[in-house]
Image (cartoon, rainbow, N blue to C red):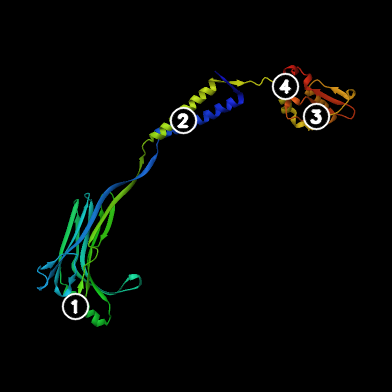
């Protein structure tokens, strides 16, 4: 069964459906064939730096401990400590580089310091002692390990700090920092890297007992990365939604096109009135009431063109009574001093159709 709708409405619906159909079809095509790209970081060269400080505190002969040494992480009595056996270890792992190397050294840094506000450390004086001079190395494989073992005689550094305090007459805290400075630089084949790693062991000086602290375990990974444009996967859910919308629009377009009938505007009176207003509307003056006249002064004219010619000759406007319903607009006038020229639409050929 066909539904009857206004012709203009039908044309408008078809136009809107076609526009929306084309738009959604384009979105469907683009999503299915060109889902877009996203930036993704790709690791070209990955590596890792690991450094550690291991130590064992050896004791003098004493009546307190049965063992000759104490392991890490304990409290040590200064008078019972003989020496500290220390091992610095550095390990580089990564893909085989093209031209990569570096150097390292180990120093003992004795410092005099005080603690300021907010527990900030203020260095008053310091002195460096070279334990291992600067040594170069190369990395020509996927793994490089460096180990250095030291025997630290704590008493020597306590004595040095005491002499400085005595000489300077400064009362401050002192400490021994044993530092391994490791520098790496070179070409990996896909880029340049430069790294610095400094494992540290800190020992308080001139105290009756102490704990060993510092940055004794370091894990420092690194990578040379490249940002690439990677095509995103097709969003199947969105494609399905677009496909459903396209199908619905296609069905709606087919229904409006083939299962609706346009209502034809068969009212000749309305067509004639529209034609008159379209052609001469700028010459009309709308009145709120009809013009009162006797039959003696009324001169009927045959057509709107005749009335326009009269208006031009007399230099008078064309008048009509305004009505919201076009069917009530029945006459047009040109008023002169003695006559009223009138065009009655009801007397025209379509009067019996429009009534």
Labels 3 and 2: the sequence-earlier one = 2
Q: Which circle's residue, 2 or 1, is located before the other in the chain?
A: 1
Q: Earlier in the sequence, mark 3 or mark 4?
A: 4
Task: Determine the image quadrant of residue 183.
Answer: bottom left
Q: For mark 1, give the secondary structure.
A: helix
Foreground mark, 4 or 1, reads 4
**Label 3 close to label 4 by CB (< 8 Å):** no
Q: CA distance from mark 2 to mark 4?
A: 44 Å
Residue at screen point 27% across, 58% down: 195
Q: Disc 1 designates what residue?
A: 159
Which is closer to the viewer, label 2 or label 1? 2
Q: Residues within 10 Å of mark 2 (few under 14, many from 20)?
A: some
Distance Cα–Cα, label 2 vs label 1: 88 Å
User: In 3D space, how far apart are the residues under numbered discs 3 and 2 (Cα atoms)?
Assistant: 55 Å
How many angstroms separate mark 3 from mark 1 (CA)? 125 Å
Name the residue tied to disc 3.
318
Image coordinates of residue 50 in percent, x first then y, are 22, 57
Left or right of 306: which side holds 89?
left
The residue tagged 4 is 269
Cα distance between the residues tagged 3 and 4: 19 Å
Circle 2 residue: 245
- Residue 185 lies, with reference to residue 10, above or below; the image says below
Left or right: residue 137 compared with residue 304: left
Q: Please indicate whether residue 138 sits to the left or right of residue 334 in the image.
A: left
- The local secondary structure at tag 3 comes to strand
User: Residue 262 or 30: which is nearer the viewer?
Assistant: 262
Image coords of residue 258 (percent x, y): 53, 20
**Residue at left 60%, top 26%?**
9
Question: Mark 2: which secondary structure?
Answer: helix
Which circle's residue, 2 or 4, is located before the other in the chain? 2
Callouts 4 and 1 close, C-beta under 8 Å: no
């Amino acid at each position: 069964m066909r539904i009857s709708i206004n012709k203009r409405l039908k044309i408008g619906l078809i136009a809107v459906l076609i526009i929306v159909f084309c738009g959604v079809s384009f979105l469907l095509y683009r999503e299915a064939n060109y889902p877009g790209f996203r930036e993704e970081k790709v690791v070209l060269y990955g590596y890792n730096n690991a450094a550690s400080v291991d130590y064992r505190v050896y004791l003098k002969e004493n009546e307190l401990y049965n063992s000759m040494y104490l392991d890490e992480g304990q409290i040590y009595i200064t008078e019972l400590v003989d020496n500290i056996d220390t091992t610095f270890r550095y390990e580089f792992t990564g893909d085989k580089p093209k031209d990569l190397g570096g150097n390292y050294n180990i120093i003992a840094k004795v410092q005099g310091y005080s603690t300021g506000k907010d527990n900030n450390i203020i260095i008053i004086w310091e002195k460096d002692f070279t334990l291992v001079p600067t040594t170069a190395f190369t990395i020509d494989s996927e793994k490089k390990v460096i180990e250095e073992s030291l025997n630290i005689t704590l008493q020597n550094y306590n004595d040095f700090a005491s002499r400085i305090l005595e000489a300077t007459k400064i009362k401050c805290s002192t400490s021994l920092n044993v530092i391994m400075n490791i520098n790496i630089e070179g070409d990996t084949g896909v880029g340049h890297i430069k790294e610095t790693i400094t494992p540290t062991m800190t020992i308080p000086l001139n105290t009756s007992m102490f704990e060993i602290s510092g940055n004794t375990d370091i894990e420092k990974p690194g990578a040379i990365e490249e940002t690439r444009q990677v095509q995103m996967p097709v969003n199947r859910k969105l494609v399905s939604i677009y496909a459903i919308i396209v199908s619905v629009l296609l069905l709606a377009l087919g229904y409006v096109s083939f299962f609706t009938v346009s209502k034809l505007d068969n009212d000749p009176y309305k067509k004639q009135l529209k034609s008159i207003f379209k052609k001469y509307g700028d010459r009309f003056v709308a009145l709120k009431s009809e013009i009162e006249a006797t039959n003696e002064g009324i001169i009927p004219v045959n057509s709107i063109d005749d009335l326009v010619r009269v208006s031009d000759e007399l230099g008078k406007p064309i008048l009509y009574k305004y009505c919201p319903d076009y069917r009530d607009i029945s006459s047009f006038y040109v008023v002169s001093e003695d006559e009223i020229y009138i065009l009655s639409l009801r007397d025209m050929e379509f009067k019996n159709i429009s009534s």
